[in-house]
Image (spheres, rainbow, N blue to C red):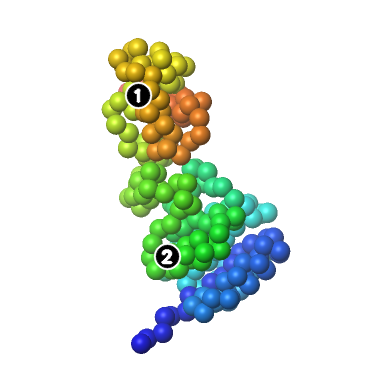
Amino acid sequence: MTARKRINIIIIEDNRLLRDGIVTMINEQADLKVVAAITERDKSLSKIFSLKPDVVLIDLGLRSQNSLQIVSSIKKKSPEIKIIVMDLLPVENDILDFVKAGASGFILKNAMVSEFLKTIRSVAGGEKVLPPHMTFSLFSQIVERAVQGTQNVDLMQAVRMTKREREVIELISDGLTNKEIGNILHLSPYTVKSHVHNILEKMTLHSRVQIAIHANQKKAHEDTSDSESHLNN
């Protein structure tokens, strides 16, 4: 029986206590090995390119706020290296930016040890991994668009909505209640509530106010684009 190839890992994390804890946790695994645990100030790129790890774990919120640039630089020079971004709760725009830069996975810093290790192994094996609260509904579509080079992808564009869900979003953005929306669309308040629930899940949002904000931002962007188009004609 052939032994599993060991996965070599570099960790970039400013918090020493967290960094040391992650190293200990990973090195207890027979198939995983931390070859370097560094801060952004330790000339991380030169170490990465010299050690050539299989996986890099990087804190999204490095004190230098340079995480995205590091990810981009790694993938440009060594595209075979897999990158996992660590954060407490990454938001949609951060996820999209890091996916475009080349990240393959995201780990919540408060994840269970088993989930943490599973993510490392999955990404090393070529999978794309998101925290559980953002899987399937949004990530696969964001990755698909990012890989295809689609620019300026926003949340409304990235999620596939039904025609009815888009009608509900439009009316929510106008400030209408579920009862008012039901009257307009000839639906029961319960059915409207069900549509709102589905929309929140697909967009990984937490309230109808956030739905309205996203919808109105999209309208404003479209209005600006239309105005620029008229000026250029």
On the image, the x and y values in percent for residue 101 come to 46, 54
Is 104 in front, or is 221? 104
Quadrant (top left/top right/bottom left/bottom right) for the C terminus: top left
Residue at 36 percent across and 28 percent down: it is: 195
Relative horizontal placement of residue 54, taking residue 20 as reference (left or right): left
Is 114 in front, or is 227? 114
On the image, the x and y values in percent for residue 44 come to 61, 67
Disc 2 or disc 1, which is closer to the eye? 1
On the image, the x and y values in percent for residue 210 come to 50, 29
User: CA gap, disc 2 to disc 1?
Assistant: 39 Å
Residue at 56 percent across and 47 percent down: it is: 89
Is 124 in front, or is 48? 124
Element under label 2? helix
Few, some or many C-alpha atoms within 10 Å of disc 1 (few <14, some 14-19, many ≥20)? few
Residue 193 position (above or below residue 18): above
Nearer-N-terminus badge (2/1): 2
Residue at 33 percent across and 13 percent down: it is: 184
Q: Is residue 226 visible?
A: no
Few, some or many C-alpha atoms within 10 Å of disc 2 (few <14, some 14-19, many ≥20)? some
- Identity of the residue furthest to the bottom in this view: 1
Q: Is residue 233 visible?
A: yes
Quickly name the residue at label 2: 122
Quickly name the residue at label 1: 191
